[in-house]
Structure formats: structure tokens, C-alpha cells
Image (cartoon, grey):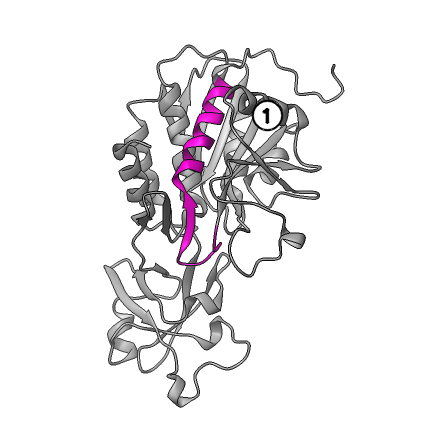
């Protein structure tokens, strides 16, 4: 990965993008894509879509969601402490003791998620988000309420880092890495003669309702769609590989197998991987994928879908970790597949 593009990835990871409030990161992504796309589209959900070869009849939609999990303020007590619920899959145990930024309309506000000192008994047994609070340093409800409103969102205050020049770590790699991947695929294919139209979509709301993916696919009416997301790596201590499979960082992109997945799209991906001499890994999505692919599949008359995922350690924590090599390989795999498509591919599994 070039330094320029690595810096763009880190910039995306630094930009707050809680589900339902993705405007800032979308504007940054559009700015980066504008010089490489034939056109840029947006919609009323907040999706940003960069397009190559828009007149092509065969349309390939790549969707990477840009939203991250967050906290949503639901109460302010008389002392000025903020209580919160979850916007997406927040793990209460990972939240304890974290710094946060409250994204108020007035100005960003720093805070900490307080925790009872171990000397005073600490946190005992199972606890939920309702047992935690944010301390912004306010003296009273009136003081903090002048800045923070019910429904304001907060994200972990965590800067992305590169470890050992091979792994990137931080909050919200799920799935701003996917947003980055679909943009880089378009950037690499820009200026090339394609037989298909490419629609690189930075989608919204995946962590909460997947509505962005529905809006994108319903508006584009793609011939096929691929979700570019993350999946659970199992290559660290404490994970039961017999139960969750063997998915490793630096093991290559992860393809899904299961009822929602179109086998012919997977055949295209596997053929490209072989030609690139690239290892791929597999995960099972027997009933549903839990990603944008599920919503895209059920738009219009139905859309054939597949899922390409990045192995990710420590999912939905402030220290999500992925491999830069895997990111590069996922980009190369998708570029090769799209570049070599004829636009005449049949995705009907009953066709020979």
C-alpha cells in the first residue's frame, strides 16, 4: 500500500462516522473519489456512490459501509453525568475506562467512561451499558445540557496506529476499511476500458439497520452486488476454532459460502485468486451474512450477491486490528475480477 493511500485510510479511521451521522466521512470520501470517477451520486439515505462506465448495461455494485458503532446519550443526571445506550453492537466490558468524544451540535466534547475504583468494589458480575456513565467534567446538569442534547452520539477517542509496519489498529475498522477498499478498487480501475459499469458505494447505517445498502441497490438496480466487510479473525488466544473456524490475519481475503451467496460470483472471485496466485479463506454464512449483502439481495427483482471480507481481530472493540497485506490483496482481487469481466456473464446457477 502506498504511503499516500495508507494515510487516506488512517484519515478515514480518524473521522467520526457513527451510524446515522456519517456526513463528515462521506464528504471526505467523495472529495478523494471525485477525480477518479465518471460521476458521483448521493441519495436520501446518505450513501455516496462513485461510478465508472455508467452507460454499461451490466452493473457491478461494491458496497462498503462507512458507519461505526457509537454511544447515544439518553439521560443527563443532576450532577452532569451522561448516561447512554448503544448505536450498534457496543460491548459494555470494552467501554469501561475509555475516553470518548461526544459529538454535540455545539462542539465536540471530551469525556471519560467512569468506573468504580477496585478499592471501592469495582464492577461486579454482569453489567450493562445502563451501569456506565460519561464524565465530561461538568458541575451540573444545566452546565452540560447547554452543550449536549438527548440523542447526541459519542465515539471512542482512539487514534489509529500501524503496528510493526504490518497491522493497522483502532476503532471502527468495521467497516471503514470496506469503505476504503471499494474506493481503492475504483481508483485502480479509473481510466481503464471496462466491459461493466462499476458502482463503488460507501453505504450508511449497516451497524443499525442496513438501510443504506437497500437504498443503494434499489436505486442502482445492479446486475450483481458484493459487500466488502470484515469478519471474525480467530488467530488470537481464547478463541474456539472448532466452533468459529480458522480465519487468520495475513491469510488472504475471506469468501463466504452459504444460501445467500451466488456461486457464480464466487467462481469469478476464485478464478481471479488463482490467476493472482493469491490465497483466500472461507467463512460459512448458512442462513444470512449479517452484512449489507442481505439487504442488497432483496431489492427489486432480486440481486445475486457475494461477500468478500477482511479478517479482523477484536470485533466491535476500540482496538480492532487488521492486516495491511490483507487489505491490499482484497483490493487486487476485486480489481482483477472486474477488469476481466466481459459483461456477458450469466449468474443463473442453472446455466451451464
Q: Give percent across and percent down for residue 93.
A: 47, 69
Q: Name, please, the residue furthest toward the right.
A: 350
> Between 202 and 321, which is closer to the camera in this rendering?
321
Confirm whether the magenta stretch covers residue 152: no
Task: Residue at 41% x, 23% y: name it.
Answer: 51
Inspect this view and state whether residue 64 appears.
yes
Q: Name, please, the residue furthest toward the bottom.
A: 120
Identify the element where label 1 is drawn: helix
Residue 116 occupies which quadrant of the picture?
A: bottom left
Confirm whether the magenta stretch covers residue 322: yes
Q: Is residue 72 above or below residue 173?
A: below
Number of residue marks: 1
Which quadrant of the figure contains the N terminus?
Answer: top left
Which quadrant of the figure contains the C terminus?
Answer: top right
Inspect this view and state whether residue 15 appears.
no
Q: Give percent across and percent down for residue 3.
A: 26, 34
Q: Which residue is mark 1?
A: 270
Q: Is residue 127 above or below residue 255?
A: below
Point out the stretch of residues depicted in magenta.
Answer: 313-338
| Residue 312 horizontal side relative to residue 26, left or right | right
| Residue 110 horizontal side relative to residue 53, left or right | left
Q: Is residue 311 above or below residue 187?
A: below
Q: Give percent across and percent down for residue 260.
A: 67, 36
| Residue 346 horizontal side relative to residue 174, left or right | right
Q: Give percent across and percent down for residue 251.
A: 51, 39
Task: Residue at 50% x, 50% y: name it.
Answer: 207
Task: Residue at 69% x, 38% y: name it.
Answer: 258
> Between 241 and 63, which is closer to the camera in this rendering?
241
Other-residue count near label 1 (Cα within 10 Å), few / some / many at <14 / 14–19 / ≥20: some
Amino acid at each position: 500500500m502506498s504511503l499516500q493511500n495508507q494515510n487516506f485510510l488512517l484519515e478515514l479511521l480518524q473521522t467520526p462516522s457513527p451510524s446515522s451521522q456519517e456526513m463528515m466521512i462521506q464528504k471526505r470520501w467523495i472529495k478523494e473519489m471525485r477525480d477518479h470517477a465518471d460521476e458521483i451520486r448521493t441519495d436520501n439515505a446518505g450513501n455516496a456512490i462513485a461510478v465508472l462506465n455508467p452507460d454499461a448495461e451490466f452493473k457491478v455494485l461494491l458496497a462498503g459501509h462507512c458507519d461505526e458503532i457509537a454511544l447515544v446519550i439518553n439521560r443527563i443526571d443532576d450532577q452532569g453525568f451522561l448516561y447512554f445506550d448503544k448505536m450498534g453492537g457496543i460491548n459494555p466490558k470494552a467501554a469501561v475506562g475509555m475516553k470518548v468524544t461526544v459529538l454535540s451540535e455545539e462542539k465536540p466534547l471530551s469525556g471519560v467512561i467512569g468506573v468504580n475504583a477496585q478499592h471501592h468494589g469495582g464492577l461486579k458480575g454482569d453489567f450493562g451499558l445502563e451501569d456506565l456513565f460519561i464524565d465530561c467534567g461538568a458541575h451540573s446538569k444545566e452546565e452540560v445540557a447547554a452543550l449536549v442534547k438527548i440523542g447526541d452520539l459519542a465515539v471512542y477517542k482512539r487514534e489509529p496506529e500501524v503496528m510493526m509496519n504490518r497491522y493497522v489498529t483502532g476503532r471502527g475498522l468495521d467497516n471503514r476499511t470496506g469503505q476504503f477498499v471499494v474506493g481503492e478498487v475504483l481508483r485502480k480501475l479509473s481510466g481503464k476500458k471496462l466491459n461493466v459499469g462499476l458502482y463503488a458505494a460507501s453505504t450508511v447505517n449497516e451497524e443499525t439497520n442496513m438501510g443504506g445498502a437497500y437504498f443503494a441497490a434499489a436505486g442502482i438496480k445492479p446486475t450483481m452486488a458484493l459487500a466488502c466487510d470484515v469478519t471474525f479473525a480467530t488467530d488470537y488466544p481464547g478463541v474456539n476454532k472448532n466452533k468459529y473456524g480458522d480465519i487468520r490475519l495475513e491469510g488472504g481475503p475471506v469468501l463466504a459460502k452459504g444460501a445467500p451467496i451466488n456461486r457464480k460470483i464466487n467462481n469469478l472471485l476464485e478464478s481471479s485468486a488463482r490467476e493472482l496466485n493469491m490465497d483466500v479463506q472461507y467463512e460459512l454464512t448458512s442462513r444470512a451474512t449479517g452484512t449489507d449483502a442481505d439487504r442488497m439481495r432483496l431489492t427489486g427483482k432480486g440481486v445475486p450477491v457475494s461477500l468478500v471480507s477482511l479478517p479482523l481481530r477484536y470485533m466491535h472493540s476500540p482496538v480492532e486490528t487488521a492486516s495491511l497485506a490483507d487489505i491490499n490483496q482484497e483490493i487486487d482481487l476485486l480489481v482483477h475480477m472486474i477488469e476481466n469481466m466481459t459483461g456477458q456473464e450469466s449468474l443463473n446457477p442453472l446455466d451451464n
